[in-house]
């Protein structure tokens, strides 16, 4: 990757986006890497505003982080898309290089690393809660751990088209079940739904009728979620949304700056400090 300039701009886009922890992570990374001229900001942007905003990014821009609802919407606006992002059907990272827009998905490697840190490297089976963009990335992460199939609990099967299309591209078999269905004992349980939406499953954990091998909850605030607390009390390893966010941000940092490895300790400390500040 060519050397990056001594000063550059980057930002996180989404709607709503004011809550994003990404500025704390990336700014701490810049400071630790000595990138004094780099800035990372928050920009409120919906799907309608995305084409114009990307078109306005000139040579001063290094890259963009994208969150909902932009990960799918950005694909037609890219000059190049890495195979993983194309398979998943969403890019959470745009890199400006050589006058082109390159799209990447760092959610997948971030999730794989977060699971590995919790001791989950080769799950025997898995159940996913939710069918959105993060669930699509989860399918790719599960494939990376060796799984070729997953059960997905959804509220409305008619809205699972994007997930099924991603599964087909990834070569992962998916069985759709209604939200609230029984989870097989020993499954890795991955919740991609908002805080509180998985409380029904947490209640089952407390009652002892749900026995997952491990749990990943992609929520990072408020933390811990009821699901995470119940899983920990049951003895199941828990991977949390902050670790996922941290590791996907670290890969974004490397893609945008060309600095590898990312200064993970500094980014982790800054993120944890910001979460602590918000909880006061």
Image (cartoon, rainbow, N blue to C red):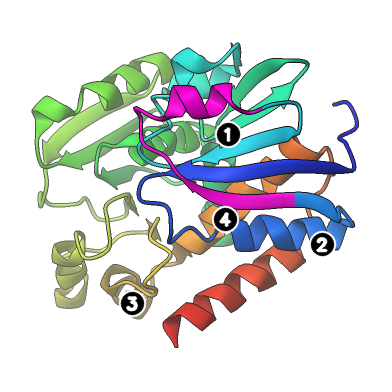
Q: Which residues are magenta?
A: 39-57
Quick check: 83 above or below 206? above
Spatial CA distance of label 1 from label 3 is: 31 Å
- What crowding class fits label 1: few (fewer than 14 Cα within 10 Å), some (14-19), or many (20 or more)? many
Q: Is residue 41 magenta?
A: yes
Which residue is labeled 2 in the image?
Answer: 31
SS at mark 1?
strand
Viewer-nearest residue: 60 or 111: 60
Spatial CA distance of label 1 from label 4 is: 12 Å
Question: Whole-percent x and y of residue 245?
Answer: 53, 54
Tag 1 near tag 4, CB within 8 Å: no
Q: Which mark is residue 93?
A: 1
Q: Which mark is residue 22?
A: 4
Q: Earlier in the sequence, mark 2 or mark 3?
A: 2
Extreme residue toward the bottom, this view: 280
Q: Earlier in the sequence, mark 4 or mark 3?
A: 4
Which residue is labeled 3 in the image?
Answer: 229
Question: Whole-percent x and y of residue 190?
Answer: 34, 51
Quick check: 244 above or below 28? above
**Residue 221 shown left or right of residue 66 in the figure:** left
Tag 2 near tag 1, CB within 8 Å: no
Q: Residue at x 55, y 16 (%)?
A: 78
Question: Whole-percent x and y of residue 188?
Answer: 36, 51
SS at mark 4?
helix
């Amino acid at each position: 990757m060519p050397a990056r300039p001594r000063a550059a701009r980057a930002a996180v886009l989404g709607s709503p986006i004011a809550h994003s922890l990404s500025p704390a992570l990336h700014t701490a990374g810049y400071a630790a890497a000595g990138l004094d001229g780099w800035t990372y900001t928050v920009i409120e942007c919906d799907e309608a505003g995305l084409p114009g905003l990307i078109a306005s990014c000139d040579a001063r821009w290094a890259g963009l982080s994208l969150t909902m609802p932009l990960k799918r919407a950005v694909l037609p606006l890219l000059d190049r898309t890495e195979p993983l992002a194309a398979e998943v059907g969403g890019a959470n990272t745009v890199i400006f290089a050589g006058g082109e827009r390159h799209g990447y998905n760092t959610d997948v490697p971030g999730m794989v690393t977060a699971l590995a840190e919790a001791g989950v490297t080769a799950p025997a089976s898995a159940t996913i809660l939710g069918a959105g963009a993060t669930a699509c990335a989860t399918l790719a992460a599960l494939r990376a751990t060796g799984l070729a199939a997953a059960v997905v609990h959804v509220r409305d099967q008619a809205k699972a088209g994007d997930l099924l299309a991603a599964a087909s591209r990834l070569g992962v078999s998916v069985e759709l079940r209604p939200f609230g269905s029984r989870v097989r004992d020993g499954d890795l349980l991955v919740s991609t739904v908002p805080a509180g939406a998985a409380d029904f499953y947490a209640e089952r954990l407390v009652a002892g009728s749900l026995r997952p091998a491990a749990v990943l909850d992609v929520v990072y605030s408020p933390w811990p979620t009821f699901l995470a607390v119940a899983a920990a009390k049951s003895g199941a390893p828990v991977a949390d949304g902050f670790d996922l966010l941290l590791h996907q941000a670290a890969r974004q940092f490397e893609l945008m700056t060309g600095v590898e490895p990312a200064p993970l300790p500094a980014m982790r400390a800054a993120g944890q400090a910001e979460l602590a500040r918000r909880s006061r």
